[in-house]
Image: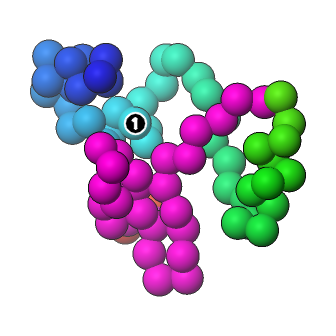
Amino acid sequence: DGVKVVSEKLGIPEKDMLMDWGGEYELLFTFDRKDLDRITDTEVQFHIIGIITEDECLLHRDEKYEVIGDGRD
């Protein structure tokens, strides 16, 4: 919710802030779906924010998936 408020106040698209904005740093990583149980069993807290398939990258937000670019466009 905080990102949306700041996005509106600064006039910067929320997706741009989520994917490219500096400031509060968090680690973004990918993993194979078959490793999900193993990763979940660790004490490291994480949140799934999207899915990468062979064809597209999907951002998960508000219980929906949005197709986003792969960073090369």
| Residue at the (56%, 46%) spot, across then down | 48
Instruction: Give the image location of residue 53, x and y in percent.
Output: 54, 76
Above-or-below relation of 32 to 2: below
Above-or-below relation of 63 to 46: below
Regarding residue 68, the answer to whether it shows in the image is no
Give the residues drawn in magenta, as a range: 44-70
- Mark 1 neighbour class, 10 Å CA radius: few under 14, some 14 to 19, many 20 or more: few
| Mark 1, residue position | 18
Q: Does 51 sit left or right of 16 as displayed?
A: right
In which quarter of the view is residue 21 placed? top left
| Residue at the (24%, 26%) spot, across then down | 4
| Residue at the (20%, 31%) spot, across then down | 12
Q: Does 14 sit left or right of 70 as displayed?
A: left
| Residue at the (81%, 47%) spot, across then down | 39
Q: Nearer the viewer, residue 39 or 51?
A: 39
Is 53 contained in the magenta span? yes
Instruction: Give the image location of residue 25, x and y in percent.
Output: 59, 23
Q: Secondary structure at mark 1?
A: helix
Q: How is this picture coloured?
A: rainbow
Q: Nearer the viewer, residue 59 or 69?
A: 59
Residue type, mark 1 in image: Leu
Instruction: Give the image location of residue 33, x and y in percent.
Output: 70, 66
Above-or-below relation of 61 to 6: below
Above-or-below relation of 49 to 1: below
